[in-house]
Image (cartoon, rainbow, N blue to C red):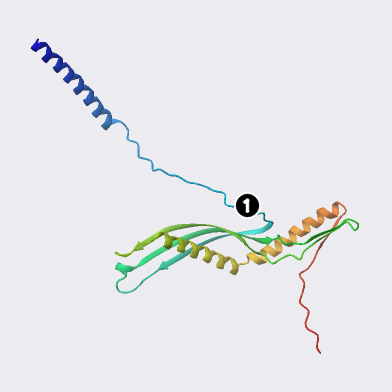
Amino acid sequence: MVIRIRSLLFLFAMVFAFAGGGWVVYHFLSPKTEPKPFEEATVLLDRVREVLKLTTVEGEFAEVYGYNEYSGYFSWLWNKKALLRVHATVAVGYDLQNLRIEVDSAARTVRLGPLPEPQILSIDHQVDYYDVSTGLFESFSAEDLTYLNKKAKELIRESALKSNLMATAREQTDKVLGIIGFVAEGAGWQVEVIPPQTTRPPLNR
């Protein structure tokens, strides 16, 4: 009886040893899958606003923006330094929200204007932080990165205002108005663009 119990115990031990060995072999020889980080996003529609904007020209910009907070003798302790590459698409055109449109059905005439000055309608930019270094006792916070992103966008805005985008937008608008006038004339209508009002000089008394 004792021998039979020992035989059963030995048999169970062999089964568990075989199963455990198989699990070890499977664990070490099976292909490993990298753990995937958990990501979660919540998108909320804040508000809907009606707009009437005409984009007449877009410009592609690539700039390099450097930031160096401290350059003293102990910069290796306190400095925060970053070099950013900024790629942006700048859309220039007109905000037509307050544009006057008058329709004279009797005269078959549409009057538009006066057109506002062209302006930057949007800046779609992407920032790459390709050289970021900090001192021993410093680090970039979330507020710092937000500030750098804002400064990079301001740099693109300044470059766009100094470029020929505004002049090109005016030229492109003339072409668009010409096409509108051509289509209207084909339908028996006329389009009149009201020029901006000029300030009259004061009368001499």
The answer to which image quadrant residue 179 occupies is: bottom right
Which residue is most to the left? 2
Q: How far across and how far down the image is residue 140, in percent?
A: 38, 61
Q: Which quadrant is home to the N terminus?
A: top left
Instruction: Give the residue drawn at x 45%, y 44%.
Output: 40
Q: Is residue 187 left or right of residue 148?
A: right
Q: Is residue 60 left or right of residue 118?
A: left
Q: How far across and how far down the image is residue 201, in percent?
A: 77, 82
Q: How far across and how far down the image is residue 121, in percent?
A: 62, 60
Instruction: Give the residue drawn at x 83%, y 54%.
Output: 184
Q: Is residue 86 left or right of residue 113?
A: left
- Foreground residue among 78 and 98: 98
Residue ID for mark 1: 48
Q: Is residue 48 left or right of residue 139?
A: right
Q: Is residue 28 above or below residue 9?
A: below
Which residue is most to the top? 1
- Foreground residue among 197 and 192: 197
Which residue is most to the right? 106
**What kind of residue is marked 1?**
Val
- Foreground residue among 160 and 113: 113
Q: How far across and how far down the image is residue 164, in percent?
A: 63, 67
SS at mark 1 in the image: loop
Q: Is residue 184 above or below residue 81?
A: above
Instruction: Give the residue drawn at x 65%, y 59%.
Output: 57
Q: How many marks?
A: 1
- Foreground residue among 136 and 156: 136
Which residue is most to the bottom? 205
